[in-house]
Amino acid sequence: MSRNRAITIDLDDTLWDCHPVIREAESKLWEWLETNYPKISDNYTQEMVADLRKKVVKDYPKKSHDYKFLRRSVLRTIFLTSGYDQKFAEDAFDFFDMHRNNVTLFEGAIETLEMLSTNFRVIALTNGNADLVKIGINHLFFDVIYAADFGYAKPDIKIFNEAIRRSGANKKDIYHVGDHPVNDIVGAQKAGLRTIWMNPTGISWPENSKEPDYTIEKITSLQDILMG
């Protein structure tokens, strides 16, 4: 199979369930802060921190897709206003990031990525900040495009066009795989890519939107579609 065929693929909630990972990382971070910087929990509740994050998003709308920026900004603020040096906020971010990348891939995801990387140029295309090196799967990807680094987030056509450019493939030969109906599927459709919707919970496709080329509930189904 020609190596100039390409796959673009989302990460969070496509290769692993992201929400419990983030909840666990935030819980562990709060426990760590209470132990190491107790004045923060004296001054803030977790609900107050969530409200502060919303304020940062409002104040920096162009950075709303840069989750590292948002979290670092919040941490610097709560450290400073609690009487600690802001430099310690980076330690807190590193602690969170370690747990944020402690993901459990869906069953069969590694084997599927191994198959894909042998036959396609696999490009991760994410609005999140999962670190493929820390997770240990970077060797299975041809490239990775982070919205925060690129400056545009899915479903903006610019980020899909950048993936097409980096792949060296014709867009008609590229599938995009993702879980989000708008960010992944509608965005990829507008860029002229074929689409595979990862829908593990079996939700209904939104009305008034063009349906994806394929819908799968398990990531292993990619092997049947792409290698069949």
Image (tube, rainbow, N blue to C red):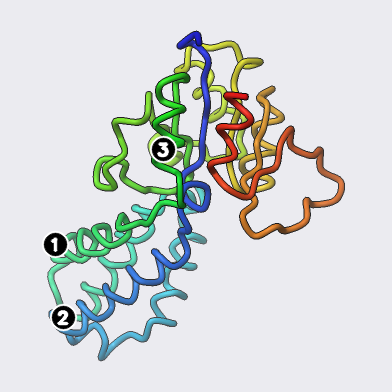
Q: Nearer the viewer, residue 201 or 155?
A: 201
Instruction: Tell me which label, 2 or 3, sits earlier in the chain.
Output: 2
Q: CA distance from mark 2 to mark 3?
A: 42 Å
Which of the two marks, 2 or 3, is nearer to us in this view? Answer: 3
Instruction: Answer with left or right where residue 153 lies relative to residue 122.
Output: right
Instruction: Answer with left or right where residue 212 lies relative to residue 3.
Output: right
Q: Nearer the viewer, residue 84 or 204?
A: 204
Q: Dot 3: within a 10 Å radius of its alpha carbon, few (fewer than 14), some, or many (20 or more) residues?
A: few
Q: Residue 221: give x, y in percent of width and height.
A: 59, 39
**If the image is split into quadrants, where does the C terminus sit?**
top right
Instruction: Answer with left or right where residue 90 lies relative to residue 124.
Output: left
Which secondary structure, mark 2? loop
Disc 1 residue type? Lys
Disc 3 residue type? Glu
Q: Residue 12: give x, y in percent of width and height.
A: 47, 50
Residue 111: mark: 3
**Seen from this angle, which residue lies furthest bottom?**
42
The image shows residue 78, relative to residue 138, as above or below, that is below
Q: Dot 2: within a 10 Å radius of its alpha carbon, few (fewer than 14), some, or many (20 or more) residues?
A: some
Residue drawn at the location 36% of the way across and 48% of the way down: 130
Q: CA distance from mark 3 to mark 1?
A: 41 Å
Q: Nearer the viewer, residue 48 or 135?
A: 135
The image shows residue 181, relative to residue 96, as above or below, that is above
Q: Which residue is mark 2?
A: 37
Disc 2 residue type? Tyr
Q: Circles 3 and 1: CB distance less than 8 Å?
A: no
Q: Which residue is mark 1?
A: 87
The image shows residue 63, relative to residue 222, as above or below, that is below
Residue drawn at the location 32% of the way across and 59% of the way down: 100
